[in-house]
Image: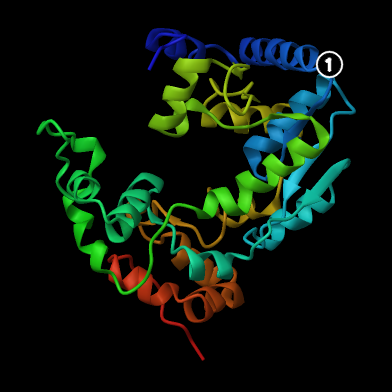
Amino acid sequence: MTKRHQDWELRQMQSLPLEAKIAKSQLRIREWYDYWNGQVYVSFSGGKDSTVLLHLVRSVYPDVPAVFVDTGLEYPEIKEFVRSTENVTIIRPEMTFKSVIEKYGYPVISKRQAQYIREARNTNSEYLYRLRTEGIKRDGSIAPYAKISDKWLYLIDAPFKIDDKCCYVMKKRPFTIYESETGRKPYIGTMASEGLNRELNWLRYGCNAFEHKRPISQPISFWLEEDIWDYLERYNVPYAKIYDMGWERTGCMWCGFGVHLEDEPNRFQRMAKTHTNLYRYCMDKLGFAEVLSYIGVPHEPVED
């Protein structure tokens, strides 16, 4: 991978005071807007990060539209907040979540591990099977990051399907269709501090990925979690009520990626208390009780 930036540059930018971060982000926002002649939009999830992004973009260009994908996986408080936000276009995926897990499989562990498990289960290639289960390349060398973690090898024989396609079908594809139909290019509220892949993307492309196969702008990608809360408080920006209910993560309600890493109460245990009916549907109708039990994730019994 060719790096456009060095690690120290990211750390330096992450250490800047909020005022300097705002100024740099606004500069990237203007660069993106000018490059695409104003044919841009904000990818809006209703979460705190994209709320800050939307406020920041509209502080420079008030008429930039926001686009929200109604996947059916959003918490009610998120949907309520989205409906209260001006100039938001709502789009929908072509499949329901239930249809996705029935056709492809459950999103558990991580996107990479789910992909590897799917490939190992479905391939007719002896080479790909050995690569995903043992990490052995064609030349006999070992590629440890190309294999399923030893801890999860047993999931190859799980009594349910596992896959990584959910995010693409439910979120990425609807945005791709919107961009194709309108010609608009997105501002996205992801941050490098959220994971290794996002950090690597920043090192390769910076904030504005003009040369990416899907051009995207991530003008707050060098911000940190505390910057988001500081901005919301400093500028008195309204945000979704779910954060005041003890929730820190407001992505897709029934996503299983990363739940095995969470302390108790995990996202599903918390859902059992704050959104009982949605929890019951997830466990019973969607089959997550069996899935979570199989991967060793604690969850609450479903009450009749």
In-front residue for pair 115/42: 115
Q: Residue 220: name its quadrant.
A: top right
In-front residue for pair 46/73: 73
Judged from the image, the secondary structure of the residue bearing numbered disc 1 is: loop
Instruction: Give residue 94's position: percent from left, percent from top.
Output: 68, 59
Vertical comparison of 224 with 102: above or below: above
Instruction: Give residue 231's position: percent from left, percent from top.
Output: 67, 27
Residue that appears at 56% across and 77% down: 281
In-front residue for pair 99/80: 99
Residue that appears at 48% across and 26% down: 192
In-front residue for pair 122/290: 122
Kind of residue at badge 1: Asn
Q: Can you say which quadrant of the picture contains the N terminus?
A: top left
Label 1 crowd bin: few (<14), some (14–19), many (20+), radius 10 Å: few
Instruction: Give residue 154's position: percent from left, percent from top.
Output: 20, 63
Q: Residue 289: name its quadrant.
A: bottom left
Vertical comparison of 16 with 226: above or below: above
Instruction: Give residue 170's position: percent from left, percent from top.
Output: 61, 54
**On the rendered structure, is 267 left or right of 296?**
right
Residue at the bottom extreme of this rendering: 304
Which residue corresponds to mark 1? 37
Give the colouring mode of the picture: rainbow
Vertical comparison of 216 with 238: above or below: above
Residue that appears at 57% across and 70% down: 98
Q: Is residue 68 visible?
A: yes
Residue that appears at 47% across and 9% down: 4
Q: Is residue 251 visible?
A: no
**On the rendered structure, is 264 left or right of 157?**
right
Q: Residue 112: name its quadrant.
A: top left
